Amino acid sequence: MRFCIILGAAKAGTTSLFNYLAQHPEILPCGNKEPNFFSKYYDKGYDWYLSLWNNDTIENKLLLEATVNYTNSPSFPDVSTNMLEFHRNYHVPMKFIYIMREPIERIESHYSYNYAHIVN
């Protein structure tokens, strides 16, 4: 089993990339795209994290998740420490994809998203 974590800012395309990659037969997407394991729920442990994939055939799959909070510093300062500890304790390969977007377009998109959800 291997892990692939998509990182990036909100409204930078992490959901789209997650959905595209999830279509590959060797990739198993997390049931909750943004589990926030390394930022909020690390104390729940390895078994809890694996249970998020709800599948018995995880052994030969790339386990995919996409959590934008992992790059939300200083709100979640322990993310990198938790990831390193996880990797060292469980000896599982971890790949990271960091997605970025042109800053002004991202801000406009984030503003529009927040406005639509507050007004409606």
Image (tube, rainbow, N blue to C red):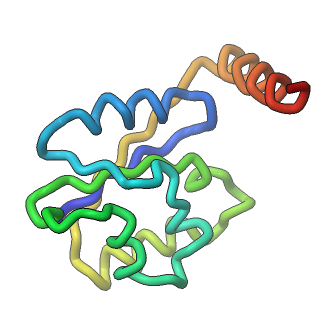
Q: Residue at x 33, y 71 (%)?
A: 50
Q: Position of residue 103 (x, y in %)?
A: 66, 21
Q: Would residue 98 be found to the left or right of residue 59 on screen?
A: right
Q: Quadrant of the C terminus?
A: top right
Indicate the quadrant where residue 25 lies.
top left
Q: Would residue 1 be found to the left or right of residue 30 on screen?
A: left
The one nearer the camera, 71 or 27, is 27
The one nearer the camera, 86 or 52, is 52
Q: Residue at x 54, y 84 (%)?
A: 43
Q: Position of residue 73 (x, y in %)?
A: 68, 55
Q: Residue at x 57, y 46 (%)?
A: 68
Q: Is residue 20 above or below residue 81?
A: above
Q: Is residue 18 above or below residue 47?
A: above
Q: Position of residue 74 (x, y in %)?
A: 73, 59
Indicate the quadrant where residue 83 lies.
bottom left
Q: Residue at x 38, y 37 (%)?
A: 18
Q: Position of residue 33 (x, y in %)?
A: 46, 48
